[in-house]
Amino acid sequence: MLPDNRKLNDYLPDFLRPHFESLLESEEPEFELAWAKLFDVLENAFLDSAKEEGISRYESLLRITPLASDNLENRRFVVLTRIGSNQIVTLQTIKEELAALVGEQGYQLTVDSSSYVMTVRLELGVKRHFDVVKAGLKAKCPANLIINVTLLYNTHSDLSSYTHAQLSAYTHHGLREEVFNG
């Protein structure tokens, strides 16, 4: 963050201030604009603090077309996923990436090494990241590994604590795919 008390007049020795006061006051807005632009460049250089302009630049470089419904955080998530796909892949790095993307409790991962199948089941609460997780795993994992990404749908045991009257407000699709806070 830039300091608010930064004035050009403060950089001059005391004996010169009266002679340049009006000149420096007229130049002050231009310097403030330059400082603000510099700060924007620094923010946009790092994904964690990048604003719209910075994320757009990363998307352009990585040839990512954002969805119209994506907010800045979702777009940052997609960029981070794409950038992270260039590292060495181990089961541990996949677990770490999934935990970073959807949280420690947001997924279940199983690997059947005899048939080369990896199954990732995502919690319903993180289903908006489904396509990004699937694309990221397909880009990152070896080609001979079959990757199944599915959602952990609600089951009868998940809904058994609700009464029939409570559940009748939902469609079959809603009962299966909506997050219930119980």
Image (tube, rainbow, N blue to C red):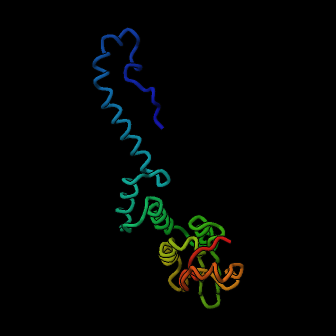
Q: Is residue 147 visible to us here?
A: no
- Determine the residue positioned at 42% across, 52% down: 51
| For residue 90, above or below residue 111 | above
Residue sticking out furthest to the front: 165
Residue 178 lies left or right of residue 15; in this view the side is: right
| For residue 45, above or below residue 81 | above
Instruction: Decide which of 99, 143 is in the foreground and name it.
Output: 99
Write down the quadrant of residue 170 in the picture.
bottom right
Residue 106 in percent (x, y) is at: 62, 71
- Quadrant housing the C terminus: bottom right
Q: How many marks?
A: 0
Residue 169 in percent (x, y) is at: 57, 79
| For residue 102, above or below residue 177 | above
Q: Is residue 50 visible to us here?
A: yes
Residue sticking out furthest to the bottom: 115
- Determine the residue positioned at 44% across, 47% down: 43
Instruction: Decide which of 175, 51 is in the foreground and name it.
Output: 175
Residue 81 in percent (x, y) is at: 49, 67
Residue 91 in percent (x, y) is at: 63, 74
Write down the quadrant of residue 147 in the picture.
bottom right
Instruction: Decide which of 125, 82 is in the foreground and name it.
Output: 125
- Determine the residue positioned at 64% across, 81% down: 165
Residue 91 lies left or right of residue 41; in this view the side is: right
- Determine the residue positioned at 40% across, 11% down: 14
Instruction: Decide which of 96, 36 is in the foreground and name it.
Output: 36
